[in-house]
């Protein structure tokens, strides 16, 4: 299934039914009087966060959503049936905005969250409503009000506890494959990850957390280069970032210190709030370098950036150090309030 995280849709509440002009006509009742009923209210459109949805791709092919129209009133003081509400399912983590006004309408975070996005029109009034002591046979009725119509922007921000951040080919996909059932593509060239992946990491039978893998961030991402900027929004709801560093990069210009400096600069340019999230340093591919070289890399990073958060050494490919990393993450997340 194609991953889509931004779409534009149109929602329309149902029109209200028209009121009826009617008079009671029965044998032996020559002056029955008005009996036109009201119309029914139009249905409203709601968005609801649903389980087992992780993309907005369906809205690319179904962009207009209309609720039911209210029925017209009829004689005999019969009120028209109200239009049916329309419930549109979206993935959890969807932010909704009005494209015409720029207003943020709300976030649908967890399964069952609902948001009213287009209210149905009010019903029209039948002529019974207008009778009075001075107007015994009114021929006046009102039409139903049109339903609310809006152009909405839906933006999906995946809900994960932990986000993986790093340069292309730092080993993010290999890590999430090792610790979860997620199976992103892994290859020996950059940008094998072209869309975010979610994986549930189970520490034991009762404890687990969700990890998100996004495409690698390159220099200039905050100006639109590469794929990382497009998906950085998916890290905004995380509680912890794992900054993966390739300790033996193929390109010498991407030495660990330079790589960390570049990504920090891109984060601060794009979103300072994201740059200030708790971020652990994870040195990957440690099986490819000597102990002395690894010590040098770690020392240079902690000294250069005054690193206060934990530093871990792993080999995502072989699985070295992953158990300690996973348990440390779980211990960090457990005392915190769940999103």
Image (cartoon, rainbow, N blue to C red):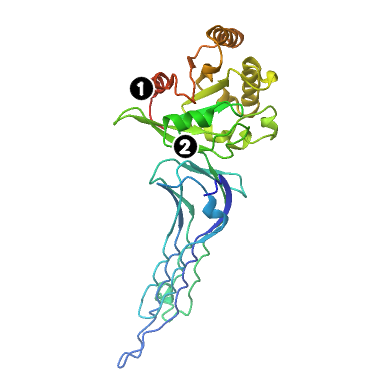
Q: Is residue 276 visible?
A: no
Question: Callout 2: 10 Å neighbours few (<14), some, many (20+)?
Answer: many
Residue at the disc numbered 1: 335
Question: Mark 2 or 1 closer to N-term?
Answer: 2
Closer to viewer: mark 2 or mark 1: 2
Instruction: Write down the quadrant of residue 259 in the picture.
Output: top right
Asked whether disc 2 touches disc 1, contact meaning CB atoms under 8 Å apart, the reply is no
Left or right placement of residue 249 versus residue 204 in this view? right
Instruction: Write down the quadrant of residue 222 in the picture.
Output: top right
x, y percentage for residue 137? 43, 81
x, y percentage for residue 213? 52, 33
1 over 131 or under it: above or below: above
At mark 1, the secondary structure is: loop
Q: Mark number for residue 169? A: none
Front residue of 239/66: it is 239
**How many angstroms separate mark 2 from mark 1 (CA)?**
22 Å
Left or right placement of residue 86 versus residue 166 in this view? left
Front residue of 248/75: it is 248
At mark 2, the secondary structure is: strand
Question: Callout 1: 10 Å neighbours few (<14), some, many (20+)?
Answer: few
Q: Is residue 31 visible?
A: yes
> What residue sits 43% from the left and 20% below the top?
325
> What residue sits 69% from the left and 18% below the top?
252
The residue positioned farthest toward the bottom in the image shown? 27
Front residue of 187/179: it is 187
187 over 139 or under it: above or below: above
x, y percentage for residue 134? 43, 77
Image quarter where the C terminus lies is top left
Residue at the disc numbered 2: 198
Left or right placement of residue 166 versus residue 70 in this view? right
x, y percentage for residue 125? 44, 70
Front residue of 44/87: it is 87
């Amino acid at each position: 299934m194609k991953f889509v995280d931004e779409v534009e849709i149109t929602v329309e509440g149902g029109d209200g039914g028209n009121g009826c002009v009617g008079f009671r006509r029965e044998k032996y009742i020559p002056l029955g009087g008005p009996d036109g009923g009201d119309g029914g209210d139009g249905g409203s459109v709601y968005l609801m966060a649903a389980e087992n949805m992780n993309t907005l791709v369906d809205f690319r092919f179904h962009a207009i959503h209309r609720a039911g129209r209210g029925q017209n009133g009829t004689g005999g003081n019969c009120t028209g049936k109200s239009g049916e509400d329309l419930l549109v399912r979206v993935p959890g983590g969807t932010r909704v905005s009005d494209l015409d006004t720029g207003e943020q309408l709300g976030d649908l975070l967890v399964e069952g969250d609902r948001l009213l996005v287009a209210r149905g029109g009010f019903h029209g009034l039948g002529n019974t409503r207008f009778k009075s002591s001075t107007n015994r046979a009114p021929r006046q009725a009102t039409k139903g009000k049109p339903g609310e119509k809006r152009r909405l922007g839906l933006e999906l921000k995946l809900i994960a506890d932990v986000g993986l951040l790093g340069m292309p080919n730092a080993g993010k996909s290999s890590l999430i494959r090792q610790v979860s059932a997620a199976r992103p593509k892994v290859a020996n060239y950059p940008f094998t990850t072209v869309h975010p992946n979610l994986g549930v990491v189970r520490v034991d039978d009762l404890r687990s957390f969700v990890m998100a893998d996004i495409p690698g961030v390159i220099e200039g991402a905050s100006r639109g280069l590469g794929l990382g900027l497009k998906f950085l929004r998916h890290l905004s709801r995380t509680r912890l970032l794992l900054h993966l560093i390739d300790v033996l990069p193929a390109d010498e210009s991407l030495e660990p210190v330079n790589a960390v400096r570049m990504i920090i600069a891109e984060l601060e340019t794009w979103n300072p709030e994201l740059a200030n999230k708790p971020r652990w340093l994870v040195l990957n591919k440690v099986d490819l370098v000597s102990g002395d070289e690894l010590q040098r890399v770690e020392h240079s990073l902690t000294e250069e950036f005054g690193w206060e958060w934990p530093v871990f050494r792993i080999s995502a490919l072989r699985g070295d150090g992953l158990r300690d990393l996973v348990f440390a993450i779980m211990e960090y997340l457990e005392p915190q309030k769940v999103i």
